Image (cartoon, helix red, strand yellow):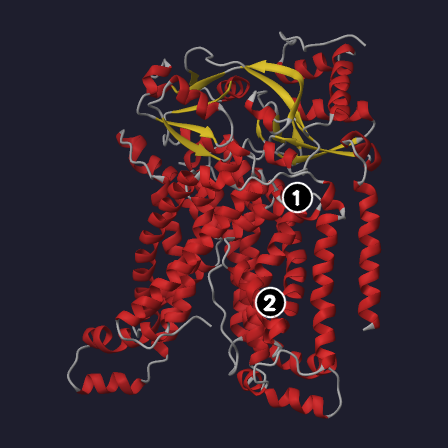
């Protein structure tokens, strides 16, 4: 009887101690206290986020950007995979502190999370094999098109071509594999990835022009302005110091044609 | 023996005051911990507005998901039962190569995870087809994802069912065989009319749990682009950001499917006038 | 033909595969320990003749056993913060999910094992004045373990196979390493055959051990497919 009581009291004290860490209000304080920021990035989306084949660690434009932001805040960044369909739940449920995962800033997504300022703009269009002979989105009627579950590539395609048949995979790599194995006739995804794929796969070709605008924003928890402001300010510091341009050049081979919506101090 | 003890207690909950104290301490402590954690502890600071109405709003997603899961379940059930029976017979036969084949089948398919088998069936087989049929001859034979899923699931569950059927066959006394032969039945007839009916009835409990496992294992189909119940639970979460409610709905529906299957098997046993056996 | 079947992909990426396999082993070992701890507690509760212990334990075990493993992994990862106020990393979420899910199946094995020991032994133990823990630890469990051994091995094989489910939440274990390499190289046949072969070798050797332990009278069977 006494032993059980002792164990019980010890448990309560341990839990109370755990509360101390989580009692901070803004994520900024909590992250600074822990010295670590958990970032969700893509693992299947070169050049933004992918797994390096030798080190097994994530690398990419977004990974470097997240590391720079962590440096600005004085903490370390730990990476976790964020799939298109798990990005928002990860933030909402508190599994990660920041999402830098090719997430388009959409008005409907603002119901669940908040966005930082845009750090890149791209668009979407289909990509297909040379042998399908598809040159325009209208030719996708009745054809099987792969997309990733949870992203807005699939829904956007259906808006432009309602007769396409969507096949939804968990990751971009599987969609590409299905395209190469001729299970699907096209894949829709963001142009950043399309350009990479076309560069590395001579048998793939882009279809038509971009039909959407996708401004990427970093995802943060809702109603935490302190944290969101810290991220925005870190991003602007990175832009001002030229590190953004270095990273962009490293991954895209050219200077950015895009300007972040910067504002003065 | 435990039933005897329970009966001897004559429905009493506690044998002694000491037991009542232990009960209150254990479950009271658990309840207090849960209440504290949810209302005063770290969990309380997390703001989560519960929106159970989304489950009703998105019921058509859940229905579509259940439909696909049932479709996969039906086909896999038939295929794995057939495979299982043949495998079980093969394991107990005297023909050397048939037995070796059955043992090989069971060992290979029980020791490879279902995920690997499904992805192999979907991507690996396609590559073989491309190499042998499609590219050389310009054909376009595709493996649809439901086919790959059913194939993998049937082969996987068939291996387990083979073991179950084998244990059922082995429990039939040799006397039955000898009696059957002495009345002039051929080997095939003995299998069909004497041994198999009894063996399959004996192993209904473990067979039931294997059948339920088909339903549960089919959840991994979502990873190869099949829009089953698991996929749609996540789709509801995507659209409404109500994760807890969506997953609870999905889990409850899986449990419902298992309950319905158990009920169906029970009814079938009553229908055929068999003594009802429930899974332990 | 070599360029089509692409067997060279395996040796080229062996380091990556090895890293994934190491993670699979780590998850397996941690989950194994936790799984059997859970199983012993809940199995003993199920076996007990006190209804206020056995019925709640039965309810918990049956509900967990009725849920698909994949759903459980996703549950534990995403709902760890709302439910327990602490966000688990993918690795630990996978470990805990496997502990609870496979532990429920293990609880059934433990219960069957405890049932296989004749009640007279427990009665004799109590009559010589030993307490509950002593009776369990010195008399019942050693005999039960001998009977349960093949079933424990079967469960462990199932646990090893189920570590592959961790891939949906982003843990780069062996299966995920395979899919990443496959995505890069488009060599599905060779990669998945390699994955299958490695899993087969590991699980088969484990199950051979179980088969050898099972060649005695009184052992219990546990060959469920999850």
| Residue A48 can be seen in this image | yes
Classify the position of the C terminus of chain A by image quarter: top right
Crowding around mark 2 (Cα neighbors within 10 Å: few <14, some 14 to 19, many 20+) is many
- Residue C75 % position (x, y): 58, 47
The chain holding disc 1 is C
Q: Answer yes or no: do the residues labelled 1 and 2 have beta carbons within 8 Å?
A: no
- Give the SS element for disc 2: helix
So how many labels did they put on this image? 2
The one of B76 and A217 positioned closer to us in this rendering? A217
Name the residue carrying label 2.
C57
- Left or right? Give the position of B274 relative to C46: left
Classify the position of the N terminus of chain A by image quarter: bottom right
Residue drawn 48% across and 23% down? A153
- Residue C68 % position (x, y): 50, 53
- Residue A69 % position (x, y): 75, 23
Name the residue carrying label 1.
C82
- Residue A65 % position (x, y): 70, 22
């Amino acid at each position: 009887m006494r032993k059980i009581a002792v164990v019980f009291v010890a448990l309560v004290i341990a839990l109370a101690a755990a509360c101390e860490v989580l009692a901070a209000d803004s994520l900024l304080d909590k992250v600074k206290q822990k010295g670590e920021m958990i970032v969700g990035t893509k693992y299947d989306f070169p050049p933004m986020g992918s797994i390096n084949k030798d080190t097994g660690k994530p690398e990419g434009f977004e990974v470097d950007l997240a590391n720079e932001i962590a440096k600005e805040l004085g903490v370390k960044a730990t990476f976790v995979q964020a799939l298109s369909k798990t990005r928002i739940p990860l933030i909402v449920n508190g599994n990660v502190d920041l999402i830098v995962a090719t997430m388009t800033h959409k008005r409907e997504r603002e119901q669940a999370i908040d966005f930082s300022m845009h750090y890149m703009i791209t668009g979407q269009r289909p990509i297909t094999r040379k042998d399908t002979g598809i040159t325009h989105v209208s030719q996708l009627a009745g054809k099987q098109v792969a997309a990733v579950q949870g992203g807005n590539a699939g829904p956007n395609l259906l808006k432009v071509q309602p007769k396409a048949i969507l096949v939804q995979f968990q990751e971009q790599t599987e969609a590409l594999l299905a395209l190469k194995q001729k299970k699907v006739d096209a894949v829709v995804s963001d142009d950043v990835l399309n350009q990479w794929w076309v560069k590395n796969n001579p048998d793939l070709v882009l279809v038509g022009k971009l039909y959407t605008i996708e401004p990427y924003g970093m995802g943060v928890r809702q109603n935490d302005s302190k944290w969101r402001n810290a991220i925005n300010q870190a991003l602007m510091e990175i832009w001002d110091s030229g590190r953004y341009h270095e990273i962009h050049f490293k991954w895209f081979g050219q200077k950015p044609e895009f300007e972040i919506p910067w504002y003065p101090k | 023996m435990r039933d005897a003890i329970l009966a001897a207690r004559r429905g009493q909950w506690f044998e002694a005051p000491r037991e009542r104290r232990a009960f209150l301490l254990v479950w009271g402590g658990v309840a207090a911990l849960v209440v504290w954690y949810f209302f005063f502890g770290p969990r309380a600071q997390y703001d989560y507005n519960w929106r159970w109405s989304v489950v009703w709003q998105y019921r058509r997603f859940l229905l579509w998901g259940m439909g696909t899961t049932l479709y996969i379940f039906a086909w896999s059930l038939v295929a794995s039962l057939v495979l299982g029976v043949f495998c079980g017979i093969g394991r107990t036969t005297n023909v050397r190569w048939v037995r070796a084949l059955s043992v090989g089948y069971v060992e290979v398919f029980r020791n490879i995870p279902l995920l690997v088998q499904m992805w192999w069936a979907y991507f690996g087989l396609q590559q073989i087809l491309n190499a042998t049929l499609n590219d050389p001859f310009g054909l376009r034979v595709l493996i649809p994802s439901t086919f790959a899923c059913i194939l993998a699931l049937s082969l996987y569950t068939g291996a387990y069912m083979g073991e179950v059927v084998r244990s059922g066959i082995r429990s039939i006394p040799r006397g039955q065989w000898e009696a059957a032969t002495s009345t002039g039945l051929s080997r095939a007839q003995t299998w069909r009319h004497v041994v198999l009916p009894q063996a399959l009835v004996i192993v209904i409990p473990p067979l039931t749990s294997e059948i339920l496992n088909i339903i549960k294992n089919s959840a991994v189909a979502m990873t190869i682009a099949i829009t089953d119940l698991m996929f749609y639970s996540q789709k509801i979460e995507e659209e409404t950001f109500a994760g807890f409610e969506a997953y609870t709905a999905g889990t409850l529906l899986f449990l419902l499917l298992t309950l319905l299957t158990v009920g169906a098997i029970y009814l079938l046993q009553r229908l055929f006038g068999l003594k009802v056996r429930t899974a332990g | 033909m070599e360029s089509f079947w692409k067997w060279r992909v395996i040796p080229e990426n062996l380091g990556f595969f090895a890293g994934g396999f190491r993670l699979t082993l780590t998850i397996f070992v941690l989950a194994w320990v936790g799984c059997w701890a859970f199983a012993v507690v809940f199995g003993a509760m199920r076996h007990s003749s006190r209804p206020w212990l056995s019925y709640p334990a039965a309810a918990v075990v049956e509900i967990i056993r009725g849920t698909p493993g994949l759903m459980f992994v996703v549950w534990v990862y995403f709902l760890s913060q709302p439910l327990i106020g602490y966000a688990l990393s993918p690795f630990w979420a996978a470990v805990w999910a496997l502990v609870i899910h496979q532990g429920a199946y293990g609880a059934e094995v433990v219960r069957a094992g405890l049932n296989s020991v004749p009640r007279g032994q427990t009665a004799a133990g109590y009559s010589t004045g030993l307490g509950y823990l002593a009776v369990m630890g010195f008399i019942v469990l050693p005999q039960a373990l001998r009977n349960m051994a093949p079933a424990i091995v079967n469960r462990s094989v199932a646990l090893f196979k189920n570590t592959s489910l961790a891939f949906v939440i982003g843990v780069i274990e062996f299966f995920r390493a395979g899919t990443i390499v496959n995505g890069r190289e488009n060599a599905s046949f060779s990669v998945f055959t390699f994955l299958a072969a490695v899993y087969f070798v590991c699980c088969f050797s484990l199950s051979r051990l179980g088969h050898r332990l099972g060649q005695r009278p009184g052992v219990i069977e546990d060959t469920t497919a999850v």
